[in-house]
Image (cartoon, coloured by chain):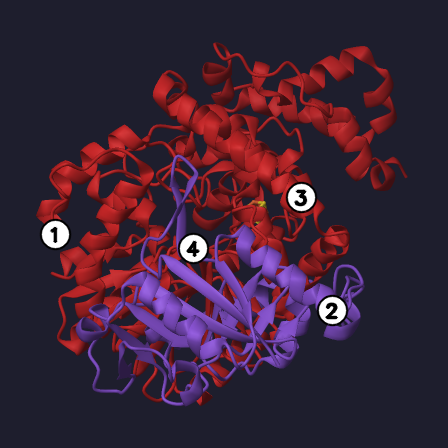
Chain colours: A purple, B red
Amino acid sequence: MNSRDRILGRVRRALADVPPHDGSYEEAVPRNYLREHGKRTLQETVDLLAENLADYRAIVHRTDTADLPHLITRLLAAHGSTEMLVPPELPASWTAAADPVRIHDRAELTPERMDRVASVVTGCAVAIAETGTLVLDGSPDQGRRRISLIPDHHICVVRVPSQVVASVPQALERLDPTSPLTWISGPSATSDIELNRVEGVHGPRTLEVILLDD
Amino acid sequence: MSGTFVGMPAFPEAARTAVDDPTLRGNLRHATHTIRAKRASAVAELADWAELREAGRRIKDHTLRHLDRFLEQLEASVTAAGGTVHWAEDAEEANRIVAALVKETGESEVVKVKSMATQEIGLNEALQAEGIRAYETDLAELIVQLGKDRPSHILVPAIHRNRGEIRDIFTHEMAAWGRPAPEDLTDTPADLAEAARLHLREKFLRAKVGISGANFMVAETGTLVVVESEGNGRMCLTLPQTLISVVGIEKIVPTWRDLEVFLQTLPRSSTAERMNPYTSMWTGTSDEDGPRAFHLVLLDNGRTDTLADQIGRQALRCIRCSACLNVCPVYERAGGHAYGSVYPGPIGAILTPQLRGTASEIDASLPYASSLCGACYEVCPVAIDIPEVLVHLRERIVQGGPAVRHGNKVVLRPARGHAAERAAMRAAAWAFGHPGALRTGQRLAARSRRLHPRTLPGPGRAWSATRDLPAMPAEPFRDWWQRTHGGKDAK
Ligand code: SF4
């Protein structure tokens, strides 16, 4: 007998008290918790997202399609970035006005090379208002997980209101578990030193979120 | 279990050392009080907290009651997604599997993201014996590793170190492990974090093998979830070519949807945040993005023994949020090290004696490391009735009885040298059976204080005799008992 069979055998013996008809999973778990907390208009949900993002020290900007390229250009310049990482299918118009050299994410790009790039610009899959969370799912406008991790400055564009949901349950409904997912709530942080929250350990220390009107 | 701290003194003695250390006491008090208040307000934001907590309890209970089925389902979905599943009966087997997997890659270094399971099995030491160096990358774990120290809190393992001590550890020890600390390192938290960032970055960028645990495993999809703050988890999960995750078999949830409960309750209970900075979810392997090889090592190591105990098995619902530590008056004074295992505080007091039995003096004394005030139960996001399990374990130690060890049925003999507890438990058992008498009888109420640390019997006495614990918890023991058990026992 191998370890797998031994462990499963132990589990079955340990559960000898559980009757064969123990009720279905659906019956066993009540789902009477809320689908979202409070009633809000779309606009109010977007406002809540902005508020909660800022509360966890992301820097929030709001803009429209016409101004977006200029805003991105200004943010990169303010950060002093000479290069920026971009995922394979970031809309070209977004960075059309930007000066920094575009470094396209490709399989050959080493982590060491990425580490020398100051900024990264990505889209996102879903944003959660109640928790101030951005979810990236590796779609072509977001790229591999590592590109939003290694550079110290992450600019993330969220289309509002279409990409915004109110709550965690609503976000999970929209996401595909087979994609690699990264949930981001504010810049990297630690509370390991006397429980003081310090921004920035290993992930980007500056997170700028652009809420782009659809 | 090789995670045991060898030669660890029994709880009361270890606790005495800790309470005599004013720095440790100060650090702990500050830390636990801060997080306690924050947690309360994070929880208060959700009007449906009680419903979420109940759903979390039911999800975990149902999973445990059908664990064999969900384990097989998980194995199938992880395999279908490109992962490889391994099964480890105990610490030794898990360590052997991991060491062999690392050697297959030809590497002699691994980066690790904080994981209770790998601490429990003593993985770093086992790898070292095989010539493999494991680098801890969580800031607190780094402080612990560089300081040749032991973790003292589930979530903030270096909670017992203040900033001055951390600066000294970094200054003296970093060079031996890689990039040295900056010469003029100050003790401001931002500078210390920056030093850790620089020290670890070179390790992340060149790492070929990453080792992690997981907070959740979804049976229907094969998805693993790691919840973290710093980004070291993301580094370990995405940059290496090979990822090895060591996860206890109880970490399963049946469906993708179940995450909607725990991703709301876990961050608020642990770091008191609406959401922690980073959560990673991956399902097997994906082309180009992340590790090419993914290995999941499913760990038993006493969990099936725990599952066999109908009262004790609820400890396996634990999602390791550490809320129970932060509210525990005993933990606050004794410190995490006194518990002699990687699981400190109230959860450690019920989990450790079940995972590794009560043969050693410290493990037998753990169920007494509590005032039964019930605060841990109140805050637990999966409603583990820790006092109930503590009383049950005390009973088993004092009176002996049937149990399962290493998969075999055994009959435990009453612990020798526990005469005092035997007496206390007999009295308590009588009182538990007659809650009316407990409520009205002054003398019996006084006797129930024997379960309170002010006058802990037996192993507790040495520890509690000199301590200034609160006279009575906010909710007296008998009220707690009445509220939680009175109804069903009075019949
Ligand atoms: S027992 Fe409950 S409160 Fe304690 S760590 Fe586990 S889940 Fe959290």
* Location of the C terminus of chain B (image quadrant): top right
- Disc 3 crowd, CA 10 A, few/some/many (<14, 14-19, 20+): some
Q: Are marks 2 and 3 on the same chain?
A: no
Q: Are marks 1 and 4 on the same chain?
A: yes
Which residue shows up at 43% across the image and 38% down it? A195
x and y, in percent, of residue B378 in the image: 68, 40
Q: Is residue B477 left or right of residue B346?
A: right
Give the SS element for disc 3.
loop
Residue at the spot of label 2: A19
Q: Are marks 1 and 2 on the same chain?
A: no
Alpha carbon of mark 1 to alpha carbon of mark 2: how far?
Answer: 58 Å
Answer whether labels 1 and 2 touch (C-beta < 8 Å).
no
**In front of the other: label 4 or label 2?**
4
x and y, in percent, of residue B404 in the image: 52, 54
Residue at the spot of label 1: B179
Give the SS element for disc 1.
loop
Does B378 appear above or below A38?
above
Chain containing mark 2: A
| Kind of residue sitting beneath label 1 | Arg
Q: Are marks 1 and 3 on the same chain?
A: yes
Chain containing mark 3: B
Which residue shows up at 29% across the image and 52% down it? B122
